Each structure stands twice: as structure tokens, then as C-alpha cells.
Image (cartoon, rainbow, N blue to C red):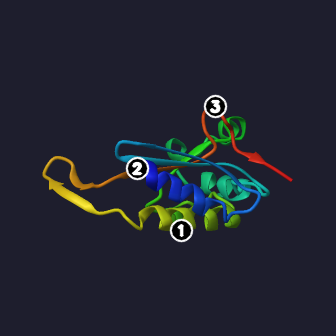
């Protein structure tokens, strides 16, 4: 995984003026977008979505604005993650495609389903390092 993390870091250098954190563990790669020259979240789209869904499904906008971090469901960025800006979506989709290039199913389990050779953890901001908009 350490070698793959190095490859990911090299790939991310192509996103100018963006800052990332890449860490790896035994069978997991973690990529966090820490900073970019644009806003990550589309606040208007989030407000519109909140009007449309039940209260228990709403995004807590005040909490998100304060914490400036969120995990990303890398399986559904293009389809359902409509609360990211277009610029952020493009970056998240590109990162996900790069990260998924070597994922292989190593076993099938009746309890846990398909088990890949490694897991992907993608996020915008982190609990201790919130996302920043940089000039």
C-alpha cells in the first residue's frame, strides 16, 4: 500500500493549487482534499435538497459550515453527491477513477459480500484539518 500511496501522491500533483493528504494502512488508502482555490460545497444546492427531503435526511448546514469536512461516498459522486460544486466533483471523480484502477475482488463472503484487495476512504477536509479555500 505504501507504494500505491506514493503513486497517488504523484498523481495528485497534477491538481494545481490543491492540497491533499494521502495515508495508507494494511488494506486501505485514505485521500483527503484539504484545500483548493474554490469552494467545495454548493450551499444553494444543499438548501434546495433540504427543502425536498424529510427532516431526518437533511444535511445540517450550520454544522457542515463550522466543521468544513465531510466523507465522500466514492460509489455515487456523479449521481447523488449533488451538494459539491462542479469543480470539486470533477476532482473527486478523477481521484476515484485513479484509486479504483487496481481494485480487485479477492473473495466473496456470505456475511460481508465482495471483499476487495483494498478499501478507499475519500473525504473533503478532516476532523482536525478543515477544508480551506485558498487564493
Give the mark toward the camera: 1 or 2.
2
Farthest-out residue, right: 135
Hey, which quadrant is residue 48 in on the image?
A: bottom right
Q: Give x and y (percent) for residue 67.
A: 67, 35
- Which numbered disc, 1 or 3, marks the residue that appears first in the sequence? 1
Q: Residue at x 58, y 44 (%)?
A: 70
Q: From where the camera sits, is residue 54 visible?
A: no
Give the residue at x 68% y 41%.
68
- Quarter of the image for residue 81 reads bottom right
**Image disc number at residue 97:** none
Give the number of the disc on residue 78: 1
What is the secondary structure assignment of the residue under circle 2? loop
Q: How many marks?
A: 3
Which residue is nearer to you in this view: 36 or 21?
21
Mark 2 Cα-neighbour bin, 10 Å: few <14, some 14–19, many ≥20:
some
Q: Nearer the viewer, mark 3 or mark 2?
A: 2
In the image shown, does 21 or 47 lie closer to the viewer? 21
Q: Which residue corresponds to mark 2?
A: 1
Q: CA distance from mark 1 to mark 2?
A: 27 Å
Ranked by sequence position, the earlier of labels 1 and 2 is 2
Disc 3 and disc 2 in contact, CB within 8 angstroms? no
Report, in whole angstroms, how far the alpha carbon at label 3 lies from the one at label 2. 24 Å
What secondary structure is found at the residue carrying circle 1? helix
Give the class, few, some or many, for how many residues have Cα within 10 Å of label 3's Cα (few <14, many ≥20).
few
Residue 26 x %, y %: 35, 42
Element class at badge 3: loop
- Which sits earlier in the primary sequence, circle 3 or circle 2? 2
Residue 69 visible within the image: yes
What residue lies at 61% left-to-right and 51% top-to-bottom? 50
Q: Residues within 10 Å of mark 1 (few under 14, many from 20)?
A: some
Residue holding disc 3: 128
Query: In the image, is 134 to the left or to the right of 56?
Result: right
Amino acid at each position: 500500500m505504501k507504494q500505491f500511496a506514493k503513486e497517488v501522491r504523484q498523481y495528485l500533483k497534477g491538481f494545481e493549487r490543491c492540497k491533499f493528504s494521502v495515508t495508507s494502512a494494511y488494506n486501505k488508502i485514505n485521500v483527503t482534499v484539504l484545500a483548493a482555490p474554490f469552494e467545495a460545497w454548493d450551499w444553494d444546492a444543499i438548501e434546495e435538497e433540504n427543502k425536498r427531503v424529510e427532516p431526518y435526511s437533511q444535511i445540517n448546514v450550520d454544522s457542515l459550515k463550522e466543521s468544513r469536512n465531510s466523507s465522500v461516498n466514492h460509489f455515487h459522486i456523479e449521481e447523488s453527491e449533488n451538494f459539491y460544486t462542479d469543480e470539486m466533483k470533477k476532482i473527486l471523480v478523477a481521484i476515484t477513477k485513479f484509486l479504483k484502477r487496481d481494485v480487485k475482488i479477492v473473495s466473496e463472503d456470505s456475511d460481508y459480500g465482495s471483499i476487495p484487495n483494498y478499501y478507499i476512504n475519500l473525504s473533503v477536509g478532516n476532523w482536525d484539518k478543515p477544508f480551506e479555500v485558498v487564493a
